Image (spheres, coloured by chain):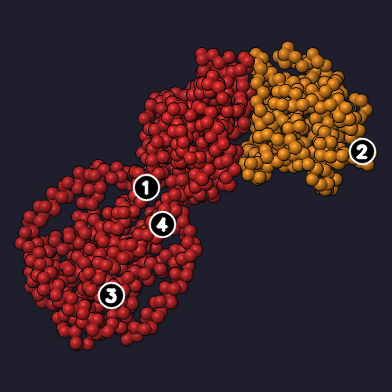
Amino acid sequence: MNRTRLPAGVLALVLATGAAAQAPRDEKRPANALEVLERSQAAFYYAGADMKARVTMELVAGAGKKRTRVLTMLRKNDSAGKRQKYFLFFHEPGDVRRTAFLVFKHPEKDDDRWVFVPAMSMVRRVAASDSRSSFVGSDFTYEDVSGRDLSADTHALLREEKLDGTDCFVVQSVPNAGAEYTKKLAWIDGRTFLPLREEYYDARGALARVFTADKVEPVLGSDGKTWPTVSVRTMKQVQSGHATVVRFEGVAYGVGLDDTLFTERALQDPPQRWTR
Amino acid sequence: MLDKTLRALAAFSIERPRLVIGLTLSATLAFASLLPRMTVDTDPKHMLPETSAVRRHNDQVEKDFALHADVLVVGVVQEEGVFDSETLSSIARLTSEIQRIPGVVSRDVTSLATVDDVTAEEGGLAVRPLLRRIPDSEDELAALRRAALGNPLLAGRVVSRDGTAAAIAVPIEPQANGKQIADEIRRLLPKESAGVRYLLAGDPLARDTFGAEMFRQMALFSPLAGLVMCLALWLMFRSLPLVAANMGVALVGIAWSMGLLVGLGFPVHIMSSMSPVFLMAIATDSVHIFNELAFRVRDVGWSRDVRGAILETIAAVGKPVFYSDVTTAAGFAALATAHIVPVRIFGLVVAFGTLVILLMSFTLVPAILALLPEQRLARIVRRARETSEREPSLLARLGDLCQRRAGVLAAAAALLLALAAVGLFRIRVNNNMVHWFRPESAVRAADRELNERLGGTATGYLVVEGRDADAMKDPALLRAVEGLQRELERDPLVGKTTSLVDVVKRVNRALHKDDPAFDRVPDSADEVAQGLFLLATSARPSDLDNLVDYPFQQTNVTLQLKSWDAGAMRGVIRRAEEHLARHPLPGGATLAPAGVAHFNMVWSDEVLWGMLESFLAGLVLVLALLVAQTRSLRWGIVAFLPLLFTIVVIYGVVGLIGKDFDMPVAVLSTLSLGMAVDFAIHFVARFQQRHREGGELRDALVYTVARPGKGIFLNALLFASGFAVMVFADLTPYVTVGVLMAAVMLLSALASVVFLPGLISFFRGVLLQGGAK
């Protein structure tokens, strides 16, 4: 992985624009595709200083067969840089209850991941596999959940158009090196900068996966800011018919997560106030 | 009544030859205009109707486990081992290029370049692509080799256990053509260099190559068979118009029946592709008309009224021609009782074509004969006179001999029947699509080599289903499945088995720092569940989907078989049942087979029993028609005996030489009935006629052997020569059909002419008082 750290200036700008996502459209128009995507990542992955949500994932195979996972997701942004820490605590299915993951996301290198396996009461490192690996068996990849390094792709702002009545930037991203897709088209809300639709194309140029933000809600953070949040999202595998529908419930920003939560010890025995 | 109708039809055709020929021609053109819409279908699955239980179950299993019905296999063979940078990069490049071919299910293409490896790393579980980049140092290559061969989920599947061959599994979309995709893959293959060889195999390749070949072979052999028959006809009669009349009848029959088939929207299958050859052979029945006409014109002198001679000929041979064609049609129509859809269609198509030929014998043939200039007819007669000087006397002596030496002949027949009976008991029912190609063909050679090196190219499934959801997390059930797998692997035809158990064990070991002691199913259901959950959090979902269904109620034990024999799967199922009788699955879990190998086994059985039913139906039908024709049960039975003799001897030989009783052979058994009985019909009808006209028994028999007997031999020779051409076909079912049909027709002609005189004179007491007046 050869990722470059973003200059601090750009980052400050990103965070600033992210915070001002609700501002009227004419305030500051992004100059190019990269800027659109930077503002989009800030709005989608970095909202608030921290976040807590109860996440329900429904994995749907054809013919109505379903697997459900319910987890508590806790996220904390590092005060500087794009680093983040994730804590994932599983409630369902019943036989994996108390399984928990700890993920340290580093923009400049592979993530660190640990898992607590309650049946063996042990914490193990999980070697991060590449970007294509699935997030807890769903149709989302780890990258989809925590964001892809923008310097890995070459971007182009194709056009601006309305998607279901919302003004959107349409950005095309082509990976510089081999990836699971050969081309991605993203429709990014011109006001909130949230991605509303993404299309991933395979090596043959055929549509392979489609992401849709099915429901966007404003969430008032403890800092008094309102964060537009995608509360229902779907990733559909067009060719196999597999799909994963994810609901974020009880989303709260700025809840005051502290670093002691993101430790091996807490992984084995997390504080109840966070996992209830 | 029948006589009158036939004669009226012939008389009308002689009166208005141009009208009859014109009408026939326009109808033929109308049917022929449908032919360009022809489509082929070679999928063995379509042998059984969509609603059949086995097809439905198979579709369900494929859906439950996200499996693909059609998978091509590309083998990469390197005797020195595939773990060198060059071979590995060639596999990686080929894999990604294959993923780009339209019709390939890219996401599920599996090779060393796409698979994940589950290992222990830094004290934890690691699921990552086996081949993240092509290693260049010897150490890295050796480590990769150890990793691949040490992982039971990979060794024997994507790489051979000895490391000399790697496989790229290429699932294709249901509507894609396996041969076209295989051709595209072939174009991508690098030049074979430095000992690397590339092989292509798999069910869709065999099937679709077969489909393409089928067209080519029939386009070659149908005209060739026609040409050979034309040549034989010309040698017999030295008359081009007669050859043309015969071939005209055949072409009309082919055009009408194939046109109807295509027009009704049916695809052409392996069986119906042979219809033209069958119809050409059946059309040679009109030889009896020419033969009799030649004798008749010679007897009465050709200067007399030619039209009268034609009418008299029709009067003499009309009834046997009618009945022999009707029995042929009935024999084919009996196939309509089969469960196998394409066989049913084939039977009806040829039955229809035969009836068309029958109609032509009484319309087109007399019309053409009526238009013949008299010198032409004169030449035919001269030719007939020359040969008749020699042959009939030869045949007459044969007729005489057959009566005097009836005892010796009967003893010889009994001996043959006893030998044949031994063969009948040794008949082995089997179906093997790969064996439909010649042993030296590329398809079969590739299949053979991949089966030697890798786990096996034929796929079968045994689906274990627990009573409730999450049953597959129960350690006791998983251990029972593991026991079943070990038992099945003792079968030499089972190359490899894979199930959820293999994954569970692998994960357990990785979670315990790669300690071999933990290469086993863990003790609690929660451990199983959490191990699998952990795997699912880092592997691709499809890695598990093929092995376990969504609610964890079923696991799919995938079998790689080294043979496409239907019997291989039967052996596996029997072994599984015996094992489960001793060690029942806990918790009331059940087992159900599926997959291509199982499907082949089921339809192979259907072919046998379906064809046996059709065969018995055909026997009864033919006997009934014989009784109807002779208006006597006794005569019917006597005429039936040469046929029975022929069938028993032929199938006895099939058993003795160890030829598999497969679909082509099974179908032939039924339809040869209707054709092989023709000779006895002609013989008995003409003998009865002669005897009625007041001949003495002995003379009447000699006459029959000499005169209609000549027609019978000519007919059989023509028939056999047409079919014998197919011996040179590249596809073995055509060879089988060619050899068997030629043998059946020659033996049946011989049996009719040689045994009937003896039988008739032996049973004359019973036959000649009541039956024949």
- Depth check: give the residue in front, B210 or A139: B210
Q: In which quarter of the image is the C terminus of chain A?
A: top right
Question: What residue is disc 2 on?
Answer: A28
Tag 3, which chain? Answer: B
Local secondary structure at mark 1: helix
Tag 4, which chain? Answer: B
Tag 2, which chain? Answer: A
Tell me, yes or no, whether the two marked residues, 2 and 1, touch with CB atoms within 8 Å. Answer: no
Question: What residue is disc 4 on?
Answer: B216
Tag 1, which chain? Answer: B
Q: Look at label 1 and name its amino acid.
A: Trp
Local secondary structure at mark 4: helix
- Depth check: give the residue in front, B550 or B546: B546
Q: Which chain is red?
A: B
Looking at the picture, do discs 4 and 3 lie on one chain?
A: yes
Local secondary structure at mark 3: helix
Looking at the picture, do discs 3 and 1 lie on one chain?
A: yes
Q: Going by the image, does B97 lie left or right of B14?
A: right
Question: What residue is disc 3 on?
Answer: B240
Q: Is residue B435 above or below residue A79?
A: below
